[in-house]
Structure formats: structure tokens, C-alpha cells
Image (spheres, helix red, strand yellow):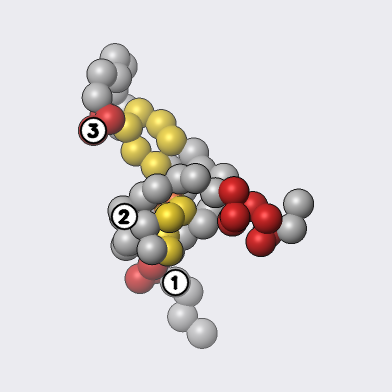
């Protein structure tokens, strides 16, 4: 599927603008992985995290 089509159907809202995949509160990653924060018994969203997050300041230098 062309990347443009994927972005048009992307429905992941994310406000973590420090992430390299974030553009105007939308996630542009082709897929994401979400897991618990090491909790055994997850009860709240605060106990989950996006493993796909990449700090936009950690880009390799040229
Ligand atoms: S990869 Fe995760 S943290 Fe980054 S924009 Fe997408 S949902 Fe947000």
C-alpha cells in the first residue's frame, strides 16, 4: 500500500510532540507497539507506553 494511503487512513492521535513520528498531534509511524510499563496488572492508561517512541532530538548527526 502506498505510504500516502496509509497516512490518509491513520487514526492514531498522539500529543507527544517530542516523538519523531508525531506531526500535528497525529502519529505517522506505519505501525506502533504499545506495552505495559512493566506492571503485572494494568488498570490505567498511565501504566502503558508506546515502545515505538523515538526522541526527535536523537537523530544521527551527518
Ligand atoms: S510512535 Fe508513539 S509516541 Fe510517537 S507519535 Fe506515534 S503513538 Fe506517539
Q: Is residue 37 left or right of residue 34?
A: left
Which element carries disc 1, helix, strand or loop? loop
Could you say whether the residue bearing mark 2 is in a helix, strand or loop? loop
Q: Give the numbered dot on residue 46.
A: 3
Image quadrant in which you'd find residue 44: top left
Q: Residue at x 37, y 57 (%)?
A: 25
Q: Earlier in the sequence, mark 2 or mark 1?
A: 2
Going by the image, does 46 lie left or right of 1?
A: left
| Position of 21 relative to 57 (above/below) | above
The residue under the point 41% across, 60% down is 22
Give the residue at x 51% y 85%: 62
Number of residue marks: 3
Q: Which residue is mark 1?
A: 59
Q: What is the x, y in percent for residue 32?
A: 51, 43
Q: Quadrant of residue 43?
A: top left
Percent of width and height locating residue 20:
43, 63
Marker disc for residue 19: none
| Label 1 vs 3, first from the N-terminus | 3
- From the Cβ of disc 1, is ligand 1 less than 8 Å away? no
1 to 60, vertically: above or below? above
Which of discs 1 and 3 lies nearer the camera? The answer is 3
Q: Nearer the viewer, residue 11 or 46?
A: 11
Mark 2 vs 3, N-terminal side? 2
The residue that disc 2 covers is 16
Some atom of ligand 1 lies within 8 Å of the CB belonging to the residue at label 2: yes
Marks 1/3: CA distance? 27 Å
Q: CA distance from mark 2 to mark 3?
A: 14 Å
Report the front residue among 7 and 20.
7
What is the secondary structure assignment of the residue under circle 3?
A: helix
Amino acid at each position: 500500500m502506498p505510504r500516502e494511503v496509509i497516512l490518509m487512513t491513520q487514526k492514531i492521535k498522539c500529543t507527544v510532540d517530542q516523538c519523531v513520528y508525531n506531526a500535528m498531534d497525529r502519529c505517522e509511524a506505519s505501525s506502533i507497539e504499545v506495552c505495559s510499563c512493566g506492571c503485572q496488572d494494568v488498570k490505567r492508561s498511565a501504566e502503558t507506553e508506546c515502545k515505538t517512541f523515538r526522541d526527535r532530538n536523537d537523530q544521527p548527526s551527518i
